[in-house]
Image (tube, rainbow, N blue to C red):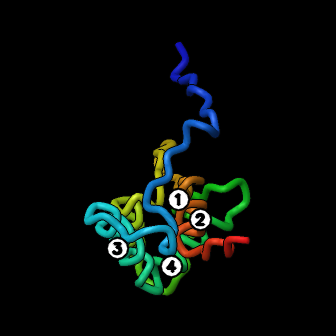
Amino acid sequence: MSNTKVLPLLDASDAVAPCCPPLTERPFTAEEAETAARMFKALGDPVRLRLFSAVASHEGGEACVCDISDVGVSQPTVSHHLKKLKDAGLLTSERRGTWVYYRVEPSVLAAMGKLLTVAPAAA
């Protein structure tokens, strides 16, 4: 008996931006401001920013918690910070045996970059 699951393929057109339009496009709604603030607040901690960077830059786009715990704090603190990043919608996780693997949602990086991008001047 196999425990293997077949996961559905995601179509890039199905990706939903997790946040907001560019700052220069229009003022945020209250909901968009809450979402953006939650994401940036989570990244406002240097340990969380290092963990987010470690996951985002890890080979294959995902990292085992065992590979990213060397950020100068204890393992329980690493787990706490990873949970905060996950709660803010910046990371997803998957348990494989005794380890948890984290990955950055691809749409998150795109949306955060788009949020801070200045729109090109109209010709």
Query: Which residue is labeled 3 in the image?
Result: 37
Residue drawn at 38 percent across, 69 percent down: 36
Q: Is residue 37 visible?
A: yes
Calculate the distance from the C-alpha at mark 2 to the C-alpha at mark 1.
13 Å
Is 53 drawn above or below residue 35 in the view shown? below
Of the pair 1 and 110, the residue shown nearer to us: 110
Of the pair 63 and 108, the residue shown nearer to us: 108
Along the polypeptide, which appears first: circle 2 or circle 1?
A: 2
Query: Residue 24 location in percent, x, y?
Result: 51, 74
Element marked by disc 4:
helix
Element marked by disc 3:
helix
Element marked by disc 1:
helix
The disc at residue 108 is 1
Of the pair 25 and 44, the residue shown nearer to us: 25
Which amino acid lies under the numbered mark 3 shown in the image of this protein? Ala
Residue drawn at 57 percent across, 22 percent down: 6
- Rendering quarter of residue 5: top right
Residue drawn at 61 percent across, 37 percent down: 13
Q: Nearer the viewer, mark 3 or mark 4?
A: 3
Query: Which residue is labeled 4 in the image?
Result: 49
Q: Label 3 neighbourhood size at 10 Å, few (<14), some (14-19), many (20+)?
A: some
Of the pair 69 and 12, the residue shown nearer to us: 12
Q: Is residue 73 left or right of residue 107?
A: left
Disc 1 + disc 3, Cβ < 8 Å: no
- Rendering quarter of residue 35: bottom left
The disc at residue 55 is 2
